[in-house]
Image (spheres, grey):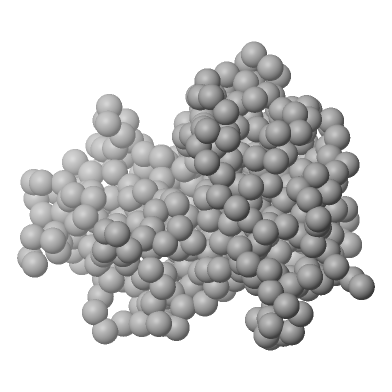
Amino acid sequence: MTPLSREAIAARLAQDIEEGWHVNLGIGMPEGVANFLPEGRDILLHSENGILGMGPTPPEGQEDPTLVNAGKKPITMLQGASIFDHAMSFGLVRGGHLQLCVLGGYQVAQNGDLANWSRDHGDPIASVGGAMDLAVGAQRIWVMMQHNSKDGAPRILENCTFPLTGSGCVKRVYTDLAVIEVTPEGFLVTEMIDGMTPEELQNRSAAPLRFAEGCGVMPDMTRAA
Amino acid sequence: MLDRRCKSIEEAMAGIEDGATVMISGFGEAGRPNYLIKCLMDTGVKDLTLVSNNAGAGYEGLAMLLRREMVKKLVCSFPRGAMGDEVQRLIKEHGLVIEVNPQGTLAERIRAAGCGIPAFFTPTAYGTALAEGKETREIDGKGCVLETALQADFALVKAHKADRWGNLTYLNLARNFSPLMAMAAKTTIVEADEIVELGQLEPNTIVTPGICVDRLVLTRPVADHEWGAAA
């Protein structure tokens, strides 16, 4: 049983993004989803500093200081891209215009609470960026994270212990072990990696898991390719 | 003749005093008015309240205002990053106050100030640490937080093209906070890549109308040594 790589989680998640969706990919792990968007679907990426239709990283030497993403890394513009100011950009976020936002996470609770901006209640420079706006505003929030922290602590919880980013906002979680829906009845596992058992996954989680009928295998799409 | 071009940089920077609230446009380096920041640094004013998304990086631009201990309060969304350790030091040793806002709330508070909206309710941050101490209300079944408009005495703004009336265009993602800040300050000072004749800006492409601009200068690059010795 091999947990999925970050790329493999990104590749799996990307398959679920539908034609015509406008999508914000959070800084960090979610940025990798851009590399696996299914061919042939028009999917527009939003970056909160003011663009819809963000394109891939430019070749070295062709970076433009006025073309950067939310992580301040160089980007390009697709044909059909649009540019707008920060208020409109967050109006698109907060006004519920984006079909999807993918965020990284420290913890997700069974009621959909998300903690992803600070691991310390007393941090004087805890930095939120756009995470709270996205958590509340996008039509659906999918979280992409390791199932357990580096020291093995569960991150799928009954209640978050870190400072909250948003309440009840998460609809689905993609981890290196499973795909988990957040339902009114709590967590519902719909896919697990090859070789994973319900008992093992439950042991690695700190909230009750239910398993969907026909719970399938979470494929490693980077390996298949 | 209405002409917002300044005859000197001193004229552009006049009136910024200790304790002023100053908005600075930009998201990282994109749209950051480096020349005006350098000139603000050179005035040596103290106890500024800065409004800017980040805390800057390195030994240039925004970061230098902090490193030179000219700032008493930073209103931002993301103080961590390259300046994180220095910001922590300034908090401990100099009592720097950091006010973190969700980025969309920060943008909307600035927009509200420029549009005569004293406050607004938003679901963003409801139930989180960033809503502590703020008035809340349930609206249409949703918990909301009352956020107030964010005004400033001065805004330092970077534009791409300008004319003498102060009409402005921006380039790509250098637009970000500039149009909002230009409306939200009592005095808006703009540095532009290019100043063109009236009529040369296509009216349909002007993003900020000149009414929002008070003073206009042409940008120039700031050399490393002009930021002063590294600490």
Percent coordinates x, y for residue B7 in the rendering: 81, 55
Residue nearest the observer in this picture, A193 or B116: B116
Outermost residue on the right side: it is: B1
Residue at image coords 63%, 56%: B219
Instruction: Give the total number of marks visible in the rendering.
Output: 0
Q: Is residue A108 left or right of residue B94?
A: left
Residue nearest the observer in this picture, B164 or A173: B164
Percent coordinates x, y for residue A139 in the rendering: 52, 68
Can residue B164 be seen in the rendering of this structure? yes
Q: Is residue A162 left or right of residue B13?
A: left
Percent coordinates x, y for residue A179 in the rendering: 28, 57
Q: Quadrant of residue A14?
A: bottom left
Residue at image coords 68%, 47%: B36
Residue at image coords 8%, 67%: A225
For residue A172, above or below residue A158: below
Outermost residue on the front side: it is: B7
For residue B89, above or below residue B224: above
Can residue B125 be seen in the rendering of this structure? no
Q: Is residue A219 left or right of residue B14?
A: left
Percent coordinates x, y for residue B33 in the rendering: 63, 51
Q: Quadrant of residue A23?
A: bottom left
Residue nearest the observer in this picture, B185 or A200: B185
Q: Quadrant of the N terminus of chain B?
A: bottom right
Residue at image coords 71%, 64%: B179
